[in-house]
Amino acid sequence: MSNSRSDGSSGRTDPLRPSDHADAAAPAADGITQPALGVVGWLRWAWRQLTSMRTALVLLLMLAVAAIPGSIVPQRSADPNGVSQFRVDNPDLFPILDGMQLFDVYTSAWFSAIYILLFISLIGCVIPRTKHHWQALRARPPRTPVRLARLDDHAEVVVPVAAGDDAVVAAGRAVDLAQAQLKRAGYRVERYDRGDVASVSAERGYLRETGNLVFHGALVGVLIAVGIGGGLTYTGQTVITEGSSFVNSPGLGYTSFNPGRFVDTGALPPYTVTLDSFDVTYTPLGEQGQGQAGDFAAHVTVQEPGEQPEEGSIRVNHPLGVAGERLYLMGNGYAPSITVRNPDGEVVYREDVEFLPQDANMTSLGVVKVPDGLAQQVGLVGFFYPSAANLATGAISSAFGDLLNPLLTLDVYVGDLGIDDGTPRNVYALDTGDMTQLTGRAIDVDSIELAPGQTSDLPDGLGTITFEDATQQGAPEAVKRYVSLSVHRDVGAPWVLGFAVLALAGLLAALFVPRRRMWVKATPTGGALHIEYAGLARGEDPAIATAVAQLAREHGEALAGAGAGAGAGAGAGAGAGAGADREGRPGDPASETPPKVD
Amino acid sequence: MPDTGLSLDDISKLLVWTAVAIYTLAFMAYAIDLARRSDQAAKMKDVATARTLVGVASGGRSQTIDEVRAEEADAQTQLEAGLGSRRRYLWARIGTSLTVLGFLFHVGGDVLRGIAAERVPWSNMYEFALTGTMLIVAVYLVVLFRYDLRFLGSFVTGLTIVLLGGAILAYYVEVVPLADPLKSVWLVIHVFVASLATAFLALAFALSVLQLMQSRRERLAIAALDADEGDKPRRQGPRFLRTLPSADALESLAYRFTIIGFIFWTFTLIAGSIWANDAWGRYWGFDTKEVWTFVVWVLYAGYIHARATRGWRGTRSAWLSIVGFSAVMFNFTIVNQFFKGLHVYSGLN
Ligand code: HEM
């Protein structure tokens, strides 16, 4: 179970790592008493602190902790309604939390400070290491240590030299074999023969450090791609009712549009999208999961200028790509067609009104505002029930999401709609502050109830209201459906993905490629060769002991096969057990079964 | 389904309950094993080797560090011993056999649930727990071929019993058609790999806990060196620690499981972003579940760094591993149920 701590035996410090890397030599005791530092000295000291492993670690932990509040407090970016609700529920707490930027955690000053520092540290860490690694890649494996037996993972054998053979030549041949063997195993090898002693030094696993650098570098790539990509990204929301169209222009088609900083909103690709029909299936009553809606599909026709109209469909998980943008299906609902006439029978209002779903069975809430054409301004608030059913309490609710028994109920208000002064108003809400209610439970007057095709009088002789049967206008169903779409363009996303995949690849190499050095040394001793094998793990390497044992075994076999000076002698090494280091590795084959040479 | 009385899902549930019952027996066997194994190990060693560890078997007395080290070296051999040459702990064998049997029922229950639902059985919390615990047991059983980790048996079966039993009681939902956002290949990949990551991280967590216990024992043994006979610390933790490898070795093993889990977790993060980009039109939005997946990832990155930072190896990094896994469990249980977000797949109301 070698780990890098046991590398200490080589007395090596690794220049590729920050000074407080576990492998690095402990700082000299006198390093702690700081000499008087000049400004440059202080800066250098600060930089070293920032790029130390400990700082990186602490910043990482801080990042983890700092991310948590954003999952507890609603965020403006992910859940704006939650933030509004929070403000209503906690009017006193809200300004305090808001002052701490807790509703915008991930763009807050403190969260940004942490990750920016972390990435500065990362860059400061990676650049010098890249330089060192670049040099290391072209360097030769290091000299064979004089005393291999001092290494943790070590084995040795004594092989007799055949009569008449020269021991020095035999030593050279034995190391030749080892060298070829190591080379085949992917090691970079270098011969260090000194006098009669032949040895080969081998190193492999540069990919480990490469992977580490690629991984850290790719994280920077991800951050940059997210940053720049965000500035070039825009998203917009729109709503289309069956039979109508959407024009891709911030001024025309969108209910809301959020461009990134560098987006030219005038340069959106001009195209129109018409919603031909919207499909949805409901799990029938009586089946498991009854009433559940699924298989949503918006069938659309896309018209790009100067091209043939093209049909397509937008489904959940399957956005439609148009001119570099992607169209997502975000929601759907019913849009009853409502006509209001004045007492003379003239149409003063005719619209497909989008009702917002309130529950799983599509009980939906909607608002009609009739500012002109009647004796007074009229506002209607009401519910649409695709499958109306009476509850025991007498209230109505929808029992199913599909159009089994469509019903519209409306309460009438008259007065000031509050839209004349030009203040923008939410089209989905009616401010009844300056209005008088004419129907509804609150004043004990029956609400207007309409099925498709039905007409009812408005109270006080204001006129009439009709819930049109949409099939009359050629729609597939009595009530039209609408979809809400989200239109996105994110040029950064593919880059982010690319860097993320690169990071993953780097991580695989960094974590699983073993980096190790191996040495084989043959020393002629009288009529025999004393052959030593040793390995040194650099970084985490659980398999080093096995690797040394395998090297020794295969080399033994190769020697025997070549008859390389080794007679039939199986003078299997007395000292092989020395491979059992202080951690004791009795189970280790290197120490239990000395390499056989016969 | 024609009226056979039992639906496939009912049979699945029955199998899962049976598995829980068998795991409970396995848990007991493993617990007995831990209670007995230190004596047994000492006896066998006395018989098997001439090397005598004086006084090891006598209860109560604290051990010297040399004795601790000798035991640990022996335990290390045991840990890496091949299947055939392992110490014959009777109760551990019973535990493992029962775990395998429970696992077969578990797999049966999981597969039947998938067949009943006509899709992969990891689409709501109940199924996720079902498959996730199955993977924990599977990874444990597979790893047994390589390392003798039977001392983790009571942890693995215990965790499985709690999660699986809890899931049936608290999270069970009937088979319903998949909601649209879940109809994606990424459900198959992303969630499965997340469970696999969890399995490896669970084993690492258990090893880190043992590492802390073992390093406390080593500390006390070293402290005992300097102490007078009278005030030597008596207790050095549970006695089964004597059959476990050194804190160092446990840490090294925990690290190996963690990096595998970390790779899978990284993949989960990336796959999740790809899916989010298809489903919601953005690859990342700091949705609550995304936040916690990120937090877990950063915590484990911290752990890996800690292992490479002087002064943070050993006990501190072990605590990070424990915190990391706690965050994984928190992410699965609390975040899924109580935090508001887009990931509403628990299937619960
Ligand atoms: C965004 C922040 C960071 C993340 C997510 C991160 C993540 C990781 C991960 C997962 C590893 C293990 C894989 C490998 O060995 O390549 C690692 C290793 C490493 N990181 Fe980072 N890192 C970050 C920042 C830093 C910084 C700022 C430094 C420099 C101070 C640094 C220095 C290192 C070193 C030296 C290793 C090798 C550790 C070893 O020898 O095992 N990292 N990092």
Image: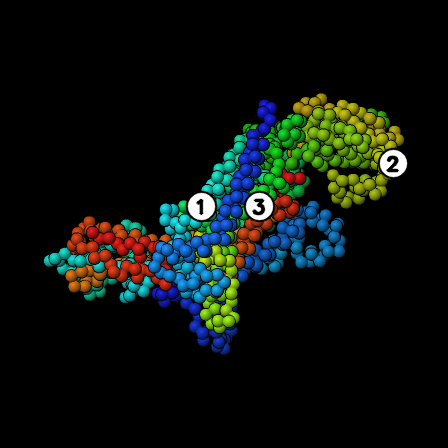
Amino acid at the residue labelled 1: Arg
Tell me the subunit letter for badge 3: B
- The residue at 54%/52% (across/down) is B325
Residue located beneath label 3 in the image: B162
Which quarter of the image is occupied by the N terminus of chain B? Answer: top right
Residue located beneath label 2 in the image: A443
| Residue A482 at least partly seen | yes
Amino acid at the residue labelled 2: Ile
Tell me the subunit letter for badge 1: B
| Residue A273 at least partly seen | no
Residue located beneath label 1 in the image: B93
- The residue at 47%/63% (across/down) is B218
Q: Looking at this view, is B142 or A273 the one in front?
A: B142
How many marks do you count on the picture?
A: 3
| Marking on residue A167 | none
Mark 1 and 2 residues: CB-CB less than 8 Å, in contact? no
Q: Which of marks 3 and 1 is in front?
A: 1
Amino acid at the residue labelled 3: Val
Left or right: where B347 falls relative to A214: right
